[in-house]
Amino acid sequence: MKKEALIRVEGVSFAYTINQTNIIPVLRDVSFQVYPGEYLAMIGHNGSGKSTLAKMLNGILTPDAGDVWVEGLNTKEKSLHREIRRRVGMVFQHPDNQLVATIVEDDVAFGLENIGVPADEMKQRVDEALEAVGMSAFRQRPPHHLSGGQKQRIAIAGILAMKPDCIVLDEATSMLDSHGRREILGVIGKLNKAGMTIVSVTHHMSEAADADRVLVMEEGQIVLEGTPREVFRQAERLHALHLDVPQASQLAAAVNRQYQRFRPDLIHKDEIVDEVERLQPPIAEVSGS
Amino acid sequence: MSQPLLQVKGLRHTYMRGTPLEHTALHGVDMYANKGECVAIIGHTGSGKSTLIQHFNGLQLPESGQVVIDGVDLSQPKLNVKELRKKVGLVFQNPEDQLFEKLVGDDVAYGPFKQGLPLEQVVEQVKWAMELVGLSFEEMKDRATYALSGGQKRKVALAGVLALRPKILVLDEPTAGLDPKSRKELLERIRYLNRQEQLTVIFVSHNMEEVAYLADRVYVMAGGCVVCSGTPREIFGNRSVLEEHQAGAPETVEILYRLYDRGFDVKPDAFLVEEAAQEILSVLPGIRR
């Protein structure tokens, strides 16, 4: 993926100031790039700096040192924030904290109203956005009666309506039940396939397994980077970083310990199933007999 | 068998009764928990789980039906709610949001202090509770609550409830939003409390790995009713219930079901990683069961 980067993070450091004597460094000289169309996951334990880093990507926070460039726009320029946030939208952890209107379609249109989009275009964009997240049937409903997963889909629709180039999800699934999570992951996967750049901060290792690339954060630095397979191969290193590997990987490793031909570096559920089939002798191809 | 410690019979609850927004959240729920048991309640958002557990310490009183806890019928007109809350400790979702004292020790001490216990006993109970959740009393009691990590704050909140020495601990989504390490630590603590300290634990969860790890028995709720109950093995082995109620299953179980669908002779209820690995090994060529 040697395209021009969509977001460039260059030598970013950041600290939260509690008072004159208490300054907590959160990011230390972090550099990385987000490329158009990629699905990037960021993992790390609580307090490793990943959420702070995510908030740097559209100027909610700005670096103490270093720069963040979004398509050539520096997030330090306050006057560019509107432009930057139109390009990079953010979905937060708590579904209830990000819905503002009393009717779903008004909520999705909120951002568009702020940037003065004409009414007929607004309607069309809202329609498309609700369609993309599968929530068209709910457009006249009050959002507070929806489930968590549905609320998060509305939040995503509000961002989609702005026609961004990138969506950043800051633990957007961590408060949802497994059904809600599957809804959101389905929407994310679909958007990414259609070309949307996704940056996802998550505690769920099986979610990170779906990404193209994984960044592992520890004490404000990126300590590991690679494809999910490369990253999850290092189970011991991840444990030392207070992280885990997906259950599918644990299972593959456990089988491999007793059966060397079974690949240990599998990360998806379906890969395990495929591997079992691959190892069957040719005659047993028609399995189950 | 003796009377269960907690027994619910035909419990109904209606929100906003007599208004156009009237909504029946519980339609005659039956359940029980024996002393020393660990019981999980699962089911997707809106199934009535939270309404149910709010009845356990008198936040909601039975509208019709019966809740009997340790011999006390919660329907009686002169219910001593204070006594009830000494018996049943309820830990809400995101309990760390409810810490309000500046110092960890003060926050944990708030409950026993308000019960009017002598200071020495308060200190003793606080110490006991903090050590139980894995917070060193000496080291942590004078730490500022705001400067703790999410996982630590949650432990403080849990200690605050345990300091009241309840007989039953009720937890709503105990590990939602925690990173893998904090999650594991907290689960180990809860398991210790249940298995070693004989504390009766009832918890609501969306995380099936957690249910598999902790629970002796599981209740599946849907639409305000208990639709199914059994051991984790029985529940995870009952695919139609899992699918119909979108309860989700541990990743291991999902993998085994996919293998089963392709005609492999595996037992899908083997939810522990090692067990699941044995199931997979049993269908690989050259290995006999």
Image (cartoon, helix red, strand yellow):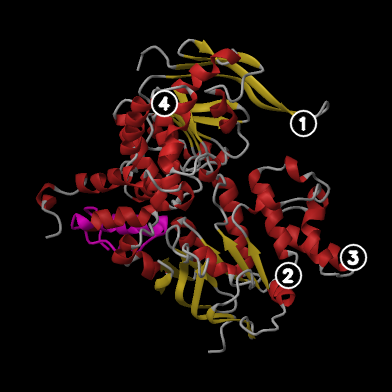
Q: CA distance from mark 3 to mark 4?
A: 59 Å
**Where is residue B90 shown, x and y percent of the image?**
64, 65
Are marks 3 and 2 in one subunit?
Answer: yes
Q: Which residue is mark 3?
A: B119
**Where is residue A247 shown, x and y percent of the image?**
41, 48
Q: What chain letter is assigned to the residue under label 2? A: B
Are marks 1 and 4 in one subunit?
Answer: yes
Compared with residue A175, is residue A72 higher up or lower down, i.e. above or below? above
Indicate which disc residue A18 carries.
Answer: 1
Circle 3/circle 2 CB separation < 8 Å: no
Q: Which residue is mark 4?
A: A162
Q: Quadrant of the C terminus of chain B?
A: bottom left
**Residue extent of the magenta highlight:** B261-289
Compared with residue A268, is residue A119 higher up or lower down, i.e. above or below? above
Front one among A247 and B78 = B78
Say few, some or many: other residues with alpha carbon within 10 Å of mark 1 (under 14 / 14 to 19 / 20 or more).
few
**Where is residue B240 shown, x and y percent of the image?**
29, 65
Secondary element at image label 2: loop
Secondary element at image label 4: loop
Disc nearer the start of the sequence (1/4): 1
Q: Which residue is mark 2?
A: B165
Q: How many marks?
A: 4
